[in-house]
Image (tube, rainbow, N blue to C red):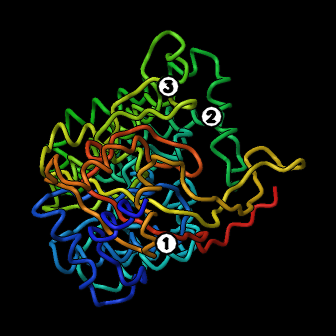
Amino acid sequence: MDDQRRIVGSAMHRIRTTDPVDDDFSDLAPLGDLIGGARVVALGESMHRVHEFLALRDRVFRFLSREHGVTAIAIESGFAEGLVVQRWIDGDDEEPFEDVLRHGMTYHFGACEESALLVETMRGSGSGSRFHGLDVGAGGAGGTRIIREILRLLDIVDPGYAAVVRGRVLPLYDYLPPDDGGIAWAAPALHAYLALPEEHRHALTAAIARIASRIDALWPQYAESAGDEAAWTLRRLADTARLGDGFLTAMIERQAGGVTPSSTRDALMARTVEALLERHERVLVVAANGHIQRSPMLAPPFVTEPFPTMGAHLAASLGADYVPVATTFGSGEVWLHRPGPDSRPGHSVPFTDWIDAATPRSLDALLAAPAIPVGILGWRGLPDDAPLAGLLDATGSTMNGDGEILSAPRTAFDGAIHVDHVTPWRTWLADGG
């Protein structure tokens, strides 16, 4: 144990602070060395809604923007919803800021001080950096935001067809629960979709396919009419709508041997990142460790059939231009939620809980050994005979909250940022059901 503590401690570089407004980035220089010239840097989260991980996200983005030419941040949130955030950053005050945070980030990821600071800083910096979502819409629940964002642009470039979509497609979403304010709204929305008659589900799939096909066919005309950015956005929205529908249909088709719904999400997120490289030289991607890892997702008993992650897709298409960096933690207080006995459908009650030290033989437990408050450890290019390589290869998982994702860290990631003690995000969510 003492050798383990000494080897890991001597290789880990201390990070002085997670404060996102701190302008002295000298402590993050080892991260710059680790990523080299890679075009896509992926920063993981071993658990969502953790203050230190969100603060690190914001600080790392400022560092990479200022010193390494990164011009976009793309997070594990709906692509269509992210357009709301970018419009506000651009100075469009059509929606109040609190609505931007609510509508612009799925999974309620905008409902915290950390995200508010990120977006406000991007608006005030004048750097031209862009905010993007990567994911299916409405947390996978099939909301109408994607169609409404498509309509916003079709009204400009194809108004006749916009009228058709508005009249024939939007009504197909009338099955969605009207109360969308709950923390867990996606659950009743998904149940409502699964309860639809087969012909209704097929009608949704067919309508989305027709929209996507028309956009694919006419995008050069759209670009000539409204510019490359509008045409690019329409094509990304079409892709998001199509694969978002695939996420939903996979829930039913899986019973007949189809792909897992989550693998469709990961494929979409990878396609979004690849498309961002058409418009940005370097991008920071922020998502769960399980999405950014290069190795297949396997997390028994919840995920028992491995499937390609976003990171696996990007490693295959980008090679060395993709550098994933995990986060790990030792212990601390975390934010969770569950339905209460009197909760309405889609509503849930927040609470906090304590998570103790990580499972033995996990990467998290290894990096916790030297008890460094916050530190970064890179192993990209590490020789197989290095003592640190032996310790890393003796681990077999990374923690996901109090669960485990099975993976070999040297295969899955190029390094990790470890936080010894975590605290809950600074949220104003207080859904009492």
Rendering coords of residue 145 (x, y %): 49, 49
- The residue at which mark 1 appears reads as 52
- Mark 1, residues whose alpha carbon is within 10 Å: few (<14), some, or many (≥20)? many
Which residue is farthest front?
2
Rendering coords of residue 343 (x, y %): 84, 50
Rendering coords of residue 264 (x, y %): 39, 32
- The residue at which mark 3 appears reads as 304
The earlier-in-sequence mark between 3 and 2 is 2
Rendering coords of residue 134 (x, y %): 36, 50
Q: Give residue 190's quadrant in the image.
A: top right
Q: Is residue 143 above or below residue 182?
A: above
Identify the mark at residue 37; answer none if there is no mark. Answer: none
- The residue at which mark 2 appears reads as 190
What SS does tag 3 mark? strand
Image position of 223 (left or right of 109): left
Which residue is farthest top?
256
Going 50% across and 9% down the picture, which residue do you hit?
Answer: 256
Amino acid at circle 1: Glu
Where the N terminus falls, by quadrant?
Answer: bottom left
Q: Is residue 325 above or below residue 122?
A: above
Image position of 161 (left or right of 141): left
Asked if disc 3 and disc 2 are in contact, CB closer than 8 Å, the reply is no
What SS does tag 1 mark? helix
